[in-house]
Amino acid sequence: MVLTVARGTSRPTPAAAAPKAPLAYTWSKALEAEMAPIYARVKNVITPMEWPHYAPLIKSINSLKEQRQAVILAHNYMTPEIFHGVADFRGDSLQLAKEAARTDAKVIVQAGVHFMAETSKLLSPDKTVLIPDMRAGCSLASSITPEDVRMLREAYPGVPIVTYVNTSAAVKAECDITCTSSNAVQVVESLGAPRVLCIPDQYLAKWVQSQTKVEIIAWKGACEVHERFTGEELERMRADEPGLKIIAHPECPPDVIAAADFTGSTSHMIQWVKDKQPRKVMLVTECSMASNVAVEAPNVEFIRPCNLCPHMKRISLENIYECLLEMRHEVTVDPDVAVRARRAVERMVNLTN
């Protein structure tokens, strides 16, 4: 049985403002020819009408990256023009932070949300970390505070606390170890404790509980994208689409996971599609991921229920360009918080390595 404790939830913030910085390149026949190899890769997910707008931005961003000695980290939920057009590293938040730490780049641009930029800063303290929009938050990260974690310590003395990477650095600093959706079970069992606090995602905690004999105590947080899916919706999709394979993220509610053919992290979902090559598949997660995976699996038909993350969608080619042009929106972490948060992250990294 999973025990849960609750706190308030967050609301999505307004859409990002339009960019105003002039571009270094404009659409022309010469640019069209130069950018043709990139477009050939994404032509099935970006229309010919969109490409003349995106191509000058992509060229301008890639040129600025060289000038700034920068790399761009793109989460799996970024739109295809970002994910396949300008990203140097692609993947989940921890994978991106680890890749950035290995590079010689002086600047990291996080095409993702704020907690991801903080994690990149924890693992690359000597690099400049930028985020195109400081308002790119996360319903999970905002569902719990450091004060909440200290309250849990008092309520459950001696019980180790595992925090999902989808939390602020300040929350990580109060916890024993971090986890991702792909290694959560391994992390929980590594602690050798009969009871473990698993925060802040209640649904990830319930999924972990289904995979282990360790008693899980959960916090009542949730991802505002994944919690909107329902098992009933999936069953309707299956009835309407004979032969459909459904794969779900463990941040989804239990009825969704029960209705799915496979449950796994974003990286595991992607690998499952590449390995299995199903004729028809539905990814029960943020809908941009289906477009990104479709580029890698052109023979698979993707059925796309679309739940957008309003925070991820604050990141655009336009504000990535302005971010690099003006070197703005630097993400920093208080040194004392960073030391403790880095310890929690590195404990997980050392375990899983």
Image (tube, rainbow, N blue to C red):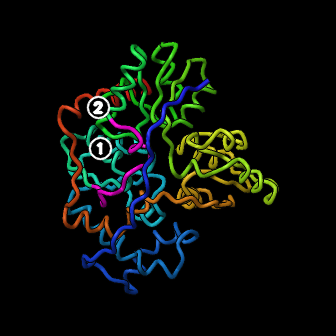
Amino acid carrying label 2: it is Ala
Work out which quarter of the rendered image holds the C terminus and state it: top left
Q: Give the range drawn in magenta.
A: 131-145
x then y, percent, for residue 100: 31, 45
Q: Residue at x 34, y 37 (%)?
A: 145
* Distance from Cα at disc 1 to Cα at disc 2: 10 Å
Q: Is residue 216 above or below residue 39?
A: above
**Badge 2: how crowded within 10 Å, few (<14), some, or many (20+)?**
many
Q: Mark 1 points at which residue?
A: 118
Q: Nearer the viewer, residue 352 or 19?
A: 19
Q: Does the magenta stretch include residue 283?
A: no
x then y, percent, for residue 106: 20, 50
Residues at circles 1 and 2 in contact by the CB criterion of under 8 Å: yes
Q: Nearer the viewer, residue 197 or 352?
A: 197
Q: Is residue 196 visible?
A: yes
Q: Name the residue under label 2.
A: 341
* Residue 345 located left or right of residue 211: left
Marker disc for residue 330: none
Q: Is residue 136 above or below residue 269?
A: below
Q: Which residue is drawn at 24% across and 46% down?
A: 104
Instruction: Look at the magenta stretch and give its main secondary structure.
Output: loop
Work out which quarter of the rendered image holds the N terminus and state it: top right
x then y, percent, for residue 303: 68, 60
* Residue 212 located left or right of residue 239: left
Q: Is residue 142 magenta?
A: yes
Q: Is residue 88 visible?
A: no
Q: Which of 86 and 309 is in front in this view?
A: 309
Amino acid carrying label 1: it is Glu
* Residue 283 located left or right of residue 114: right
Q: Residue at x 22, y 41 (%)?
A: 333
x then y, percent, for residue 241: 79, 59
* Residue 183 located left or right of residue 136: right
